[in-house]
Amino acid sequence: MDITPYVDSLKRDLLAAAEGAGDEARQVAERLSYAIDPAARLAMMEAISQAAAEITAELPNGGVDVRLDGRDLDFVVHAPSNIPAPPAPPAPPMPGDDDEEGGLSRITLRIPESVKAKAEEAAAKSGQSLNTWLVNVVRTATRDGAINVDIDLSSIPFFGGDPFGGGKQRGNRRMSGWV
């Protein structure tokens, strides 16, 4: 990165500010502009180095270094060598789900925002879009032989603590879903 244009811009601004003050002020500004060149370069390099350090601090792995190459700055990005594997591909369609020959239908689904947020999280965890995840949930629930499970677990004693974190309250531990 060549910072010379930025230093030159600073010099031009200094000279422009001195224009209205007369010839003597302009001469002083010209002399100052030559003296300010190394200080301005150093200040810019320090600011850019600080920015690189802040970016590095925010990255989970790797980092950014700033190196001086003559009068130019070079950026070196350190990427982690063990890049995480991409999410698993979506599960293949269930066997016998060839009933999509009629095309697609569009519906409007109104659900509480909290339920939508949980559905989005579940879809992201499975590496699917929300729409694909919802289609698979509906497909599972409507396939032949699907069983809706809704079990009250409050009467089952759990030795060594409640795995659901419900404390001693009865009736608040349920498990439901489609099998």
Image (tube, rainbow, N blue to C red):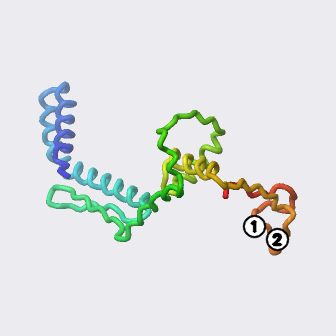
Residue 96 percent location from the top left of the image: 53, 55
Q: Secondary structure at mark 2?
A: loop
Residue 31 percent location from the top left of the image: 13, 42
**Left or right placement of residue 52 versus residue 88 in this view:** left
Frontmost residue, 30 versus 175: 175
Q: Amino acid at mark 2?
A: Phe
Q: Amino acid at mark 1?
A: Pro
- Residue sitting at 55 percent across and 51 percent down? 136
Q: Judge the density around disc 2: few (<14), some (14-19), many (≥20) Cα neighbours within 10 Å.
A: few
- The extreme top residue here reads 20
**Left or right placement of residue 56 versus residue 16 in this view:** right
Q: Give the label on residue 6, or none.
A: none
**To which residue does mark 2 refer?**
158
Residue 33 percent location from the top left of the image: 16, 42
Frontmost residue, 155 versus 81: 155
- Residue sitting at 35 percent across and 63 percent down? 63
Looking at the rendering, in which quadrant would you find the C terminus? bottom right
**Left or right placement of residue 9 versus residue 137 in this view:** left
Q: Note whether 19 is above or below 41 in the view shown.
A: above
Q: Note whether 86 is above or below 18 in the view shown.
A: below
Quadrant hosting residue 151: bottom right
**Left or right placement of residue 23 versus residue 133 in this view:** left
- The extreme bottom residue here reads 160
Q: Secondary structure at mark 1?
A: loop
Frontmost residue, 6 versus 92: 92
- Residue sitting at 37 percent across and 65 percent down? 62
Quadrant hosting residue 64: bottom left
Contact (CB < 8 A) between labels 1 and 2?
A: yes
**To which residue does mark 1 refer?**
163
Q: Note whether 23 is above or below 117 in the view shown.
A: above
Q: Earlier in the sequence, mark 1 or mark 2?
A: 2
Mark 1 and mark 2: Cα distance apart in space: 8 Å
